[in-house]
Amino acid sequence: MIKLLPMLCLSLIFLNSCSSDPEPVEVRYEQPELLYNEVAGNVAEPQDLEHLRYGENVKGYTIGRYVDPSDPTIMYEQSVLYRLEQPSSWNLQPNMPVKVPFEGTPRKLLTDDDRHLRAEIESKASEERAFYEYLKASAAETKKNESVLKKTVLLSKKLMEQNQALLKQIQQREAEKAQYEKTIQKQQLQLKKLIEYYELKEREQIKQNRFRRN
């Protein structure tokens, strides 16, 4: 009996532990302490500045002589005025190289000179497009004028043919007129000769009549 008592106690303890839920164990996490190292700042390289900030855009304007608006007795000499057209700002689009599939080589970063060159190329391309449109409009206008010129040439040719025909008619009329004048002159000459013949006959007849009277 005495030997069974420890076994009964162990059984009761085991049954008691199985019947009740175990208490959850709380786990605490401690925030690690941040360690700050004081490091001296590094100056950005000049070639990296274009990826960090945009440069300032300053323009100079020549101002002629002008009178002080608050005092008309004061005049300022000609000078140069510098104006900040665009202040410096952070570059939020650094234009980092983008890997394009099957491109082979990464894109080259654009510098300020490349941007100015691209702007100049785009300006030249715009001028060439405008010049092409001008040439196109000029070609259309030339084609239109060519059509009008062709019509004018055809009309001039037709008028020339009419003038030549009219000139031939005039020459023919002048030839007929000259022939008619020759015919009239010939008839006048014949008539003159006929009148002279009758006058001669008449004088002879008068002479014969006088001779018979005598």
Image (cartoon, grey):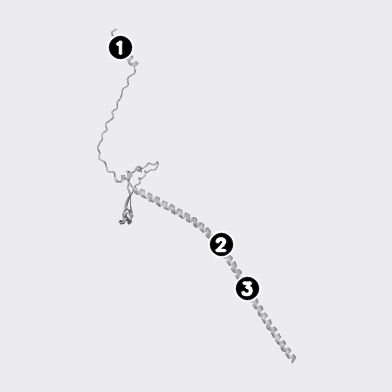
Q: CA distance from mark 3 to mark 2?
A: 32 Å
Instruction: Name the kind of residue labelled 3 in the image.
Output: Lys
The mark nearer the N terminus, 1 or 3, is: 1
Comparing marks 1 and 3, which lies closer to the viewer? 3
Q: Are marks 1 and 3 in contact (CB under 8 Å)?
A: no
Residue 117 in percent (x, y) is at 37, 50
Residue 11 in percent (x, y) is at 32, 12
The mark nearer the N terminus, 1 or 2, is: 1
Comparing marks 1 and 2, which lies closer to the viewer? 2
Q: Which mark is residue 9?
A: 1
Q: Secondary structure at mark 3?
A: helix
Q: Which mark is residue 177?
A: 3
Q: Secondary structure at mark 2?
A: helix
Q: Residue at x 72, y 87 (%)?
A: 206
Residue 167 in percent (x, y) is at 59, 68
Q: Which mark is residue 155?
A: 2
Residue neighbourhood size for the residue with mark 1, other residues' Cα within 10 Å, grouped as few (<14), some (14–19), many (≥20): few
